[in-house]
Image (cartoon, rainbow, N blue to C red):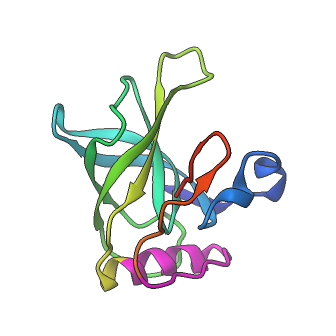
């Protein structure tokens, strides 16, 4: 099942949201991930923004590794839609706080085609998320202690 919802501001307080360029939507579903070293597999989608996503898997993915995603429309989005295929790069890879041995990878999207942009924006709007989508992918921004996030 693919569920989507707008993140409650209390969930992101102190989490660095103010440093992010795009708002995030919590999604709990499987996402098809293609990795150079592992091929195609299903991983758990954690959240989606207009500039990237986070997924979890039972292994760590190297930073800067290219990755491709196939994302189905969220259940309950209230909009027609189709699968979106997006390429990106792994920008963070951390061990989950859960005791299940999983890792959480943050990925930044590369350039999106116009159809993918519109589709993701429609998903956000269908859940009441205020998302503005400018031209092109987000640019990396520096911040204290590391690189900017998507």
What are the residue bounds of the magenta stretch?
117-135
Q: Is residue 12 magenta?
A: no
Q: Position of residue 101 (x, y in %)?
A: 48, 16
Q: Is residue 51 left or right of residue 58?
A: right
**Looking at the image, can residue 100 be seen?**
yes
Q: What residue is rendered at 50% in x and 81% in y? A: 122
Residue 131 percent location from the top left of the image: 61, 77
Q: Nearer the viewer, residue 150 or 81?
A: 150
Say left or right for 81 vs 40: right
Foreground of the two, 142 or 72: 142
Instruction: State whether residue 11 is above or below residue 52.
Output: above
Determine the residue positioned at 16% across, 32% down.
37
When the figure is inspected, residue 9 is found, relative to residue 61, above or below; the finding is: below
Residue at screen point 53% across, 78% down: 78
Is residue 7 at least partly visible in the picture? no
Which residue does the image show at 50% across and 84% down from the upper left? 134
Q: Where does residue 57 sit, x and y in percent of width and height?
A: 40, 30
């Amino acid at each position: 099942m693919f569920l989507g919802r707008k993140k409650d501001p209390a969930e992101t307080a102190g989490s660095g949201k103010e440093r992010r360029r795009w708002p995030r939507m919590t999604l709990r579903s499987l996402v098809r991930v293609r990795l150079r070293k592992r091929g195609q597999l299903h991983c758990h989608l954690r959240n989606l923004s207009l500039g990237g996503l986070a997924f979890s898997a039972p292994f760590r993915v190297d930073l800067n590794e290219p990755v491709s995603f196939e994302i189905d429309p969220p259940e309950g989005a209230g909009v027609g839609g189709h699968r979106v295929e997006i390429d990106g790069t792994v920008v963070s890879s951390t061990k989950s706080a859960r005791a299940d041995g999983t890792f959480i990878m943050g990925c930044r999207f590369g350039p999106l085609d116009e159809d993918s942009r519109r589709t993701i924006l429609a998903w956000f709007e269908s859940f009441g998320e205020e998302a503005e989508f400018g031209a092109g992918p987000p640019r990396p921004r520096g911040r204290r202690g590391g690189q900017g996030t998507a």
